[in-house]
Amino acid sequence: MDPKWNEDLPIYRQLRDRVVAMILEGVLGDGDALPSVRNVAAEYRLNPLTVLKGYQELVDEGLVEKKRGRGMFVNEGARKQLLKDERRRFIDKEWPQVIATIERLGLDVATLLEQVEQTDDAGDENE
């Protein structure tokens, strides 16, 4: 996790978002334990209640479960659910802005696809 905190969002929310990113990226998988509240609090010099609040949001969303005396663990299917939710959010919130930008700049699909192919080809050459 990145120790830099953004001033615009509460830290507990940023912590929650970082755990979500770790699940989406496959760093944390189904059944994996989250770092303990104490460890995260100590490592990032946070109040343990702040860490707990971020983790509680994940519990409330059904992504993580508390196991009394053992810690918190990623629920089965959490990544699948997150991908579904993130795709829906992208299509509903971000995609309309992307389309508006494309139209404003007068770009067409063929030009965009050409750019994607060039980017993919450049990536292949670097591997």
Image (tube, rainbow, N blue to C red):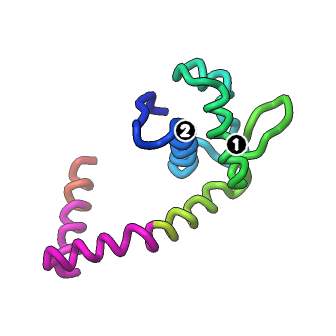
Q: Say whether residue 80 is left or right of residue 112.
A: right
Q: Amino acid at mark 1?
A: Gln
Residue shown at the point (49%, 33%) measured from the top left:
1
Q: Main secondary structure of the magenta part?
A: helix
Residue designated by label 1: 56
In this rendering, would 114 be left or right of 83? left
Residue farthest along the right direction in this orientation = 68
Tag 2: amino acid:
Leu
Q: Give the number of the disc on residue 15.
A: 2
Q: Residue 95: image x %, image y %?
A: 37, 72
Q: Quadrant of residue 70?
A: top right
Q: Is residue 31 visible?
A: yes
Residue 16 x %, y %: 57, 43
**For this view, does 45 lie left or right of residue 36?**
left
Where is residue 51 shown, x and y percent of the image?
62, 32
Q: Is residue 73 magenta?
A: no
* Magenta segment includes 117: yes
Between the residue at mark 1 and the residue at mark 2, the CA separation in whole angstroms equals 11 Å
- Eyeballing the image, is 2 above or below 94? above
Residues under numbered marks 1 and 2 in contact, where contact means CB atoms less than 8 Å apart: no
Pick the front one: 78 or 54: 54
Q: Which residues are magenta?
A: 90-119
Q: Secondary structure at mark 2?
A: helix
Q: Residue 5 at x, y = what percent?
A: 43, 33
- Looking at the image, residue 21 lies above or below residue 86: above
